[in-house]
Amino acid sequence: MTLHADYDPDNIFAKILRGEMPSVKVYEDDVALAFMDVFPQSEGHTLVIPKQVEARNFLDMPTEKLGAYMARVQAVAQAVEKALVPDGVVVTQFNGAPAGQTVFHLHFHIIPRWSGRALGSHAGGQMADIGELEGIAQKIRPFLA
Ligand code: 5GP
């Protein structure tokens, strides 16, 4: 059911795109917005969402818009890697609530991983300190300029 439904223009990420909800941004152009996840699964957990499209998930995304969007996803993943020097990077995405999706505007997660450091739970746990997120974003931004 959540896999195929009408796009809700009041979802949290649509509000962030319209500037109605705050976010700690790392990159924005006319194709995509990247910002820090407020319930990060690891230090540097970043989300990349497409702009100017009502896509709930990857399956909904117009194919002709996918290339430009995925180029931004890769650019943000590369910037996170350069800024934070993790041992690995998870790039992932969920489609439909049974698959783990909780916000219904397409997004890719970029989650740095370090050997021996446990991964936090998905879409749960403690809200991050916004000052700390801003500090991490400041490290990532120069690699996207
Ligand atoms: P999903 O579960 O849909 O794959 O991922 C949604 C992500 O959005 C989760 O990782 C969750 O922590 C994050 N998230 C939920 N609400 C907010 C919010 O208001 N601001 C930000 N920056 N991230 C959010």
Image (spheres, rainbow, N blue to C red):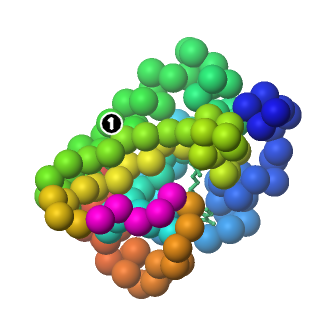
**Does residue 119 show up magenta in the picture?**
yes
Q: Is residue 145 visible?
A: no
User: Residue 110: x, y in percent?
Assistant: 37, 49
Quadrant position of ligand 1: bottom right
Mark 1: amino acid? Gln
Which residue is painted at 39% across and 76% down in the image? 134
With 95 as the anchor, is 14 left or right in this view?
A: right
Number of on-image labels: 1
Residue labelled with disc 1:
74
Which residue is painted at 19% across and 60% down in the image? 114
Q: Is residue 71 above or below residue 86?
A: above
The magenta segment = 118-122
User: Residue 61: x, y in percent?
Assistant: 62, 25
Secondary structure of the magenta portion, mostly? loop
* The furthest residue to the top: 64
Q: Is residue 91 above or below residue 141?
A: above
Q: Is residue 123 above or below residue 61?
A: below
Task: Judge by depth and name the residue closer to the eye, 83 or 143.
Answer: 83
Q: Quadrant of the image for the N terminus?
A: top right
User: Residue 3: x, y in percent?
Assistant: 73, 31
Which residue is painted at 39% across and 60% down in the image? 45
Q: Is residue 124 visible?
A: yes
Which residue is painted at 56% across and 67% down in the image? 124
Task: Judge by depth and name the residue closer to the eye, 29 or 53.
Answer: 53
